Image: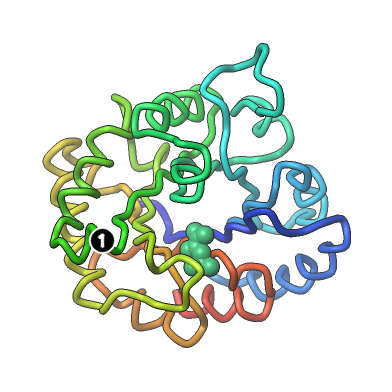
Amino acid sequence: MPKKLAAGNWKMNGSSASAPEVAALLPRIADVSCQVLLCPPATLVTSMKNWAGSSDLLIGGQDCHANESGAHTGDISAAMLADAGATHVILGHSERRADHGETDAMVKAKTRAAHAAGLVAIVCVGETEAERDDSRALDVVGAQIAGSLPDGVTGDSTVIAYEPVWAIGTGRTPTLEQIGEVHDFLRDTLTRQLGTEGANLRLLYGGSVKPGNAAEIFAVSNVDGALVGGASLNSSDFSGIIEAL
Ligand code: PEP
């Protein structure tokens, strides 16, 4: 099993003025045993790589195009992210699925592109509130996993983030039992599909993780880290989460 992972998704936030926030995080992550990753907007990947200096802070993108280059105005490729200093890329976040109509097939093509560029793909899955109310959470994440992962996925190349859509940025979280049920289901599904690699794949929980709830979430079976949105923008909150991992 690779190390646990604390990943921060800055979404469309941050600027050149964010350097002190990253500088404040670096001493807090110096001695932790998990991997720490920040995914800023693409405009800040190179700057953040420089701000990280010789620390162990990893840098990732928030999306990539499925093609390596070409006539795709406004898009960036996985190879460009890697060239800018990224080692990871978040794919299929529910905000991309909702705002940009991303389908499982598109996420699969992007995941393939990320792997070809040597990036670790963090593939996001999760049900809406209506789907959970309809007792379809496991069916939905099962279908997203089946549709979004290309052949050849390994524990080193891919991470899965379970992010219930209704918990993202809302301050609401599932019960620990609900998180455990989905993570156990994902582990079983992936192990059946991929054998040992499925057992090695890290499963992150994401959705309103904060310093105050991180420890109890990380104690749930098959939770191997977190994908953190809002709380990753503040070095003190993010380090509080990392220290609970
Ligand atoms: C996210 O955007 O992936 C996320 C989990 O956001 P938040 O932590 O703010 O709910």
Identify the residue at horizontal 36%, vertical 62% (top origin). Answer: 224
Is 94 situated above or below 144? Answer: below
Q: Give the residue at the far top of this rendering.
A: 70
Q: In this figure, which residue is indicated by the disc labeled 1?
A: 130
For the rendered model, the colour scheme is: rainbow
Identify the residue at horizontal 60%, vertical 73% (top origin). Answer: 238
Q: Is residue 137 left or right of residue 209?
A: left
Q: Name the quadrant of the C terminus.
A: bottom left
Q: Please tell me whether mark 1 sits on a helix, a strand or a loop.
A: helix
Residue 154 locus on image (x, y percent):
33, 36
Residue 12 locus on image (x, y percent):
68, 54
Is 61 situated above or below 216? Answer: above
Q: Is residue 145 left or right of residue 191?
A: right
Q: Which quarter of the picture shows residue 55?
A: bottom right
Q: Is mark 1 within 8 Å of ligand 1?
A: no
Is any atom of residue 33 visible in this view? no
